[in-house]
Image (cartoon, rainbow, N blue to C red):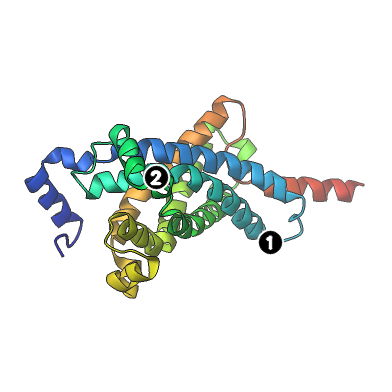
Amino acid sequence: MKYHGISSGLSILWKEQGPLSLWRGWSGKFFGYGVQGGCKFGLYEYFKKFYSGSLADHNRSLLFFISSASAQVFADIALCPFEAVKVRVQTQPCFAKGLADGFPKLYAAEGVKGFYKGLLPLWGRNLPFSMVMFSTFEHCVDLAYSDLLGKRKEDCTRAQQLGVTCLAGYAAGACSTIVSNPADNVVSALYNKKSDSILQAVRNIGFAKLFTRSLPVRIMLVGPVITSQWFLYDSIKLICGLPTSGGNIRHVEEASSSSAKDG
């Protein structure tokens, strides 16, 4: 294999294609994951409220899993065309320079199906990623307020609330990356045209390497990205006068139980 790790990959790309090669595909990443993040975070809040009535008596993790999975299904439909162009731009230097020329070129070559060729493995990567991420975030927020700060979210300053958001966001990003790594390798193999099917991709990569290949790099990159997403999302919520994410279900349950006792 040409690339044996992040150090050799950076060195070879720098020597052979120059420093600009490290930024190839940035537009697909920026706009694609911007659209996906908006759908994912916004729809998660919607589905969490939507399912809270019917799942109020069940485990809280089940509520987080179902809400995040529902949101991620729609978010990946929005992301998939950007991801298809991005991966080709990154791995096929002669394909296109970015989104502007990549979209029409991919459509002319493969039609609409070309944009959604990797939708199933993308769901296979992002659904467990999202489910673990939101659930881990919610539980980490509860632990941070109850064990680290020892007070309710409403009694904390905005800086403390955003600090909890960043801490829980990084933990959520790292945990979800481990779960989604096998599907991420399959998606890359399909878009790179190194494999024609999911089974062939698994055979070519090897079952064990599905879990370990590129994992340190992804943890190092995805952790800060997820943290930044949560920080930006909660900052906007605070500016709009809304509470930061996490901890709301517990407070609703406590309020309901206390009112029932008073009654």
Is 56 displayed left or right of 42 in the figure? right
The secondary structure type at the circle numbered 2 is loop
Nearer to us in this view, 148 or 187: 187
Q: Which residue is mark 1?
A: 59
Coordinates of residue 29 in the picture (x, y in percent): 35, 41
Coordinates of residue 246 in the picture (x, y in percent): 59, 45
Q: Give the residue type at disc 2.
A: Gly
Nearer to us in this view, 213 or 225: 213
Q: Give the residue type at disc 1.
A: Asn
Callout count: 2
Is 89 displayed left or right of 231 in the figure? left
Q: Which residue: 57% across, 47% down?
A: 71
Nearer to us in this view, 189 or 152: 189
Q: Can you see residue 247?
A: yes
Q: Can you see residue 248?
A: no
- Structural distance between the alpha carbons of marks 2 and 1: 44 Å
| Mark 2 or mark 1, earlier in chain | 1
* Contact flag, marks 2 and 1 (Cβ < 8 Å): no
Q: Is residue 206 above or below residue 78?
A: below
Q: Is residue 156 above or below residue 51?
A: above
Within 10 Å of disc 2 (Cα), the crowding (few <14, some 14-19, many 20+) is: few
Within 10 Å of disc 1 (Cα), the crowding (few <14, some 14-19, many 20+) is: few
- Which mark, by number, is residue 24? none
In the displayed image of the protein, which residue is found farthest to the left? 15
